């Protein structure tokens, strides 16, 4: 049985009511995204003007939609103010360093916002599940991570942490899509396939990670990500709500008429090499 409830479809499943959110059209999504991106530009100007230091961490299962959300955030922003950090596997030298050391180099200076596409939480996730760290290293991370983040907050850095939650069924659908889409095939790695086979282990690791690191100074925010478009809009809207800002958009500049100067002679076009006009 199906009934309507405030824009949601409500299904009767035995004795339990299961709500299915109404789908969002491409037109509605793009309209709302455009509004949010204008606000992101305002936030960017505020961060620059006030010398704020902001870290936004994006974590979650493979194919949960982190990268797509990051792209929509940065799409209209100045890369000198808002930059993305997506570190590769640590080098042999980095493996001998203090665990947080390679991340410290990427922390924001005044007037910057840094988006971490995965972060130091690799140790509590993939490293823990795949056995890339020892039990002692993992336990030390759980002890030191909250203190590390509190230290960053005391130094004036605002930390925002998002966990993108995706169902087993939706992740499988996205993996299959990557297999059949040439431009997305690079996103599917042997590590992704291994994580697919260790769903429960990753769930336990996430639960334990939250238990230790969901702290008052830097709490975790969970983004329901089965619907990519909704997840992006909800995450960006929430991000904007966490940093009070004012509109400091510069006033439009009036361009004066171009002044033509005499004496310049353009070199012959034949002296230049042009890209072939195929299209």
Image: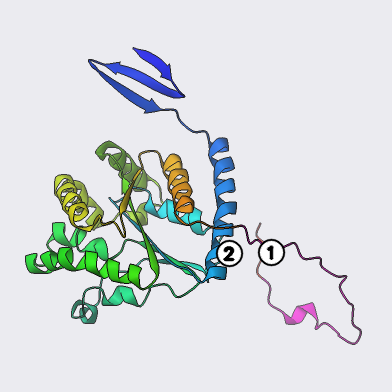
Label for residue 45? 2
Identify which residue is drawn at 18% across, 46% down. Answer: 199
The image position of residue 180, as x and y in percent, is 37, 45
The part of the image, by quadrant, that contains residue 22 is top left
Label for residue 179? none
When the figure is inspected, residue 23 is found, relative to residue 151, above or below; the finding is: above
Indicate whether residue 255 is drawn in magenta: yes
Relative to the observer, which residue lies in front, 125 or 110?
110
Question: Dot 2: what SS?
Answer: helix
The image position of residue 143, as x and y in percent, is 15, 65
| Tag 2 and tag 1, C-beta contact below 8 Å | yes
Q: Quadrant of the N terminus?
A: top left
Whether residue 121 appears in this view of the structure is yes
The image position of residue 35, as x and y in percent, is 59, 46
- On screen, residue 25 versus residue 61, left or right, reads right
Label for residue 250? 1
Indicate whether residue 192 is drawn in magenta: no
Answer few, some or many: residues within 10 Å of disc 2's Cα (few below 14, many 20 plus, some between 14 and 19).
many
Q: Main secondary structure of the magenta part?
A: loop
The image position of residue 269, as x and y in percent, is 78, 77
Whether residue 183 appears in this view of the structure is no
Identify which residue is drawn at 29% across, 76% down. Answer: 102
Answer few, some or many: residues within 10 Å of disc 1's Cα (few below 14, many 20 plus, some between 14 and 19).
few
Q: Which residues are magenta?
A: 247-274
């Amino acid at each position: 049985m199906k009934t309507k409830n405030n824009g949601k479809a409500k299904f009767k499943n035995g004795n339990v009511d299961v709500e299915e959110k109404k789908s969002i059209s491409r037109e509605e999504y793009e309209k709302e995204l455009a509004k949010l991106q204008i606000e992101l530009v305002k936030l960017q100007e505020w961060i620059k003007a006030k010398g704020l230091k902001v870290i936004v961490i994006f974590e979650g299962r493979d194919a949960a939609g982190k990268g797509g959300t990051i792209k929509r955030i940065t799409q209209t922003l100045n890369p000198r103010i808002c930059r993305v950090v997506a570190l590769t596997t640590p080098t042999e030298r980095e493996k001998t360093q203090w665990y947080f050391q390679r991340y410290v180099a990427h922390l924001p200076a005044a007037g910057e916002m840094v988006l971490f596409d995965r972060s130091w939480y690799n140790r509590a996730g993939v490293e823990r599940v795949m056995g890339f760290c020892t039990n002692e290293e993992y336990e030390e991370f759980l002890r030191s991570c909250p203190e590390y983040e509190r230290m960053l907050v005391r130094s004036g850095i605002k930390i925002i942490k998002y966990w993108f939650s995706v169902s087993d069924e939706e992740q499988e659908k996205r993996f299959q899509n990557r297999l059949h889409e040439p431009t997305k095939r690079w996103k599917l790695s042997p590590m992704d396939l291994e994580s697919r086979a260790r769903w429960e282990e990753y769930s336990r690791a996430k639960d334990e990670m939250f238990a230790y690191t969901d702290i008052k100074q830097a709490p975790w925010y969970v983004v329901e990500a089965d619907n990519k478009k909704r997840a992006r809009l909800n995450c960006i809207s929430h991000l904007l709500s966490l940093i009070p800002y004012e509109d400091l958009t510069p006033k439009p500049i009036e361009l004066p008429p171009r002044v033509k100067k005499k004496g310049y002679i353009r070199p012959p076009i034949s002296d230049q090499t042009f890209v072939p006009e195929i299209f």
